[in-house]
């Protein structure tokens, strides 16, 4: 199933943040929204998820218009991982992951053994089964991000949308989250994620959309879209892209 939009305009109320956006995320593909802080990536995400009404254009999940689907139907097709989740209640990690099954439950129904197995499998796939009994409020920021990813996996949606999953994480946890994203794509999950770090896009994305005020400036294969001129214009500073010695890995440096 593909998440796509055509000639999309998005914003808040009468204020338009971006317009004319057309992109698609297919199964097994990692697509990245890359741009500076305040460029409108989160607003675009909320619109693609139906949390904000589109100001124009269309959004489709598979063969269906987003506006024709119930919230439960959307949740069974797209899982959302926010930048962070506040730990206000001492839920166990297992309980937080199990919340991903809410889209399959009736108003007064409790989780079934099958739902609980989905949660346990998600914890195991991300290598955090040892955290299952821990309190969500007492684990590290990086561990919380992995728990939110596990919740999305338990949701069993073919598309996962992640809003800056590496934000506020240390280097080690950023590497771990990027590795999880790539592994999920190999397993056939379609991934749409946002970042303000070009190196993350170069390391992980198949396709990139450059996002700034006004909408998407360019969208296409990472090697074609992410270049020194485009990044310098996007961030307003001189940037060079260099290959690491002895490999094809590309990184960004200040010119």
Image (cartoon, rainbow, N blue to C red):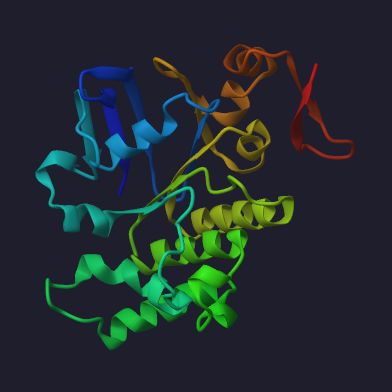
Horizontally, residue 21 falls left or right of residue 93, namely left
Q: Is residue 140 above or below residue 33?
A: below
Residue occupying image coordinates x 48% and y 52%: 84
Residue 140 on image: x %, y %: 61, 64
Horizontally, residue 245 falls left or right of residue 115, namely right
Residue 195 on image: x %, y %: 55, 37
Q: How many marks are shown on the rendered structure?
A: 0
* Quadrant in the picture for residue 234: top right
Horizontally, residue 133 falls left or right of residue 55, namely right
Residue occupying image coordinates x 45% and y 58%: 86
Outermost residue to the bottom: 113
* Quadrant in the picture for residue 227: top right
Residue occupying image coordinates x 58% and y 30%: 222
Residue 36 on image: x %, y %: 55, 25
Using the rendered image of the protein, determine whether residue 65 is visible from the camera's viewpoint.
no
Outermost residue to the right: 245
Horizontally, residue 131 falls left or right of residue 243, namely left
Using the rendered image of the protein, determine whether residue 208 is visible from the camera's viewpoint.
yes
Q: Quadrant of the C terminus?
A: top right
Outermost residue to the front: 88
Q: Is residue 93 above or below residue 206?
A: below
Residue occupying image coordinates x 89% and y 39%: 246
Near-viewer residue (142 or 135): 135
Residue 45 on image: x %, y %: 36, 37
């Amino acid at each position: 199933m593909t998440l796509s939009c055509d000639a999309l305009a998005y914003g808040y109320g009468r204020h338009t943040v971006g317009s004319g956006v057309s992109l698609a995320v297919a199964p097994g593909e990692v697509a990245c929204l890359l741009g500076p802080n305040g460029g409108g990536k989160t607003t675009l995400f909320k619109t693609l998820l139906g949390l904000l009404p589109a100001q124009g254009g269309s959004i489709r999940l598979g063969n269906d218009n987003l506006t024709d689907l119930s919230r439960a139907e959307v949740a069974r097709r797209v899982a959302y991982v926010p930048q962070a989740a506040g730990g206000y209640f001492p839920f166990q990690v297992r309980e937080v992951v199990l919340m991903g099954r809410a889209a399959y439950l009736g108003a007064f129904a409790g989780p079934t053994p099958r739902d609980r197995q989905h949660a346990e499998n998600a914890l195991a796939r991300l290598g955090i089964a040892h955290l299952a009994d821990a309190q969500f409020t007492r684990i590290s920021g990086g561990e919380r991000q992995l728990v939110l990813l596990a919740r999305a996996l338990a949701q069993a949606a073919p598309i996962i949308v992640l809003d800056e999953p590496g934000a506020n994480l240390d280097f080690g946890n950023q590497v771990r989250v990027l590795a999880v994203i790539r592994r999920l794509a190999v397993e056939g999950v379609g991934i749409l994620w946002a970042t303000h770090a070009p190196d993350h896009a170069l390391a992980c994305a198949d396709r990139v959309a450059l996002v700034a005020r006004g909408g998407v400036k360019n969208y296409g294969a990472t090697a074609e879209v992410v270049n020194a001129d485009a990044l310098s214009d996007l961030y307003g500073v001189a940037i060079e892209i260099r290959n690491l010695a002895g490999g094809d890995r590309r990184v960004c440096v200040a010119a």
